[in-house]
Amino acid sequence: MTVRQVADYLQIHPETVRRWLRDGALRGVNLGGVAGWRIQHAELERFIEERRKPG
């Protein structure tokens, strides 16, 4: 998934996704340049579940 696809899926701004990637909270592969980041769907699901946990 691209940064835009993740942002659309979560209904957030793409820069928020990029910040999570830079901070290491969300894992992805930076293909560089125009290609940008790619995030596996399974990683996005892991990230969502991790954020749902209380405390």
Image: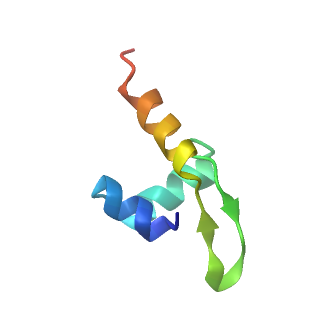
Q: Residue at 72% x, 76% y: name it.
A: 32
The residue sitting at 47% across, 40% down in the picture is 45
Q: Is residue 49 left or right of residue 13?
A: right
- Coloring applied to the structure: rainbow
Determine the residue located farthest toward the bottom in the rendered image: 34
The residue at the far front in this view is 42
**Is 6 drawn above or below residue 54 in the view shown?**
below
| Left or right relative to 8: residue 25 | right
Instruction: Using the image, determine if residue 19 lies above or below residue 53.
Output: below
Q: Quadrant of residue 30?
A: bottom right
Depicted 53 relative to depicted 49: above or below:
above
Q: Quadrant of residue 14?
A: bottom left
The residue at the point 59 percent across, 53 percent down is 40
Instruction: Please provide percent x and percent y for residue 15.
Output: 44, 65
Residue at point 38%, 61% (across, down): 7
Q: Residue furthest left?
A: 11
Estimate the x, y position of residue 29 in percent, counting from the top left: 70, 60
Is residue 7 rendered to the left or right of residue 39? left
Q: Position of residue 27 (x, y in %)?
A: 63, 47
Residue 8 x %, y %? 33, 64
- Number of numbered discs visible in the structure rendering: 0
Q: Quadrant of the C terminus?
A: top left
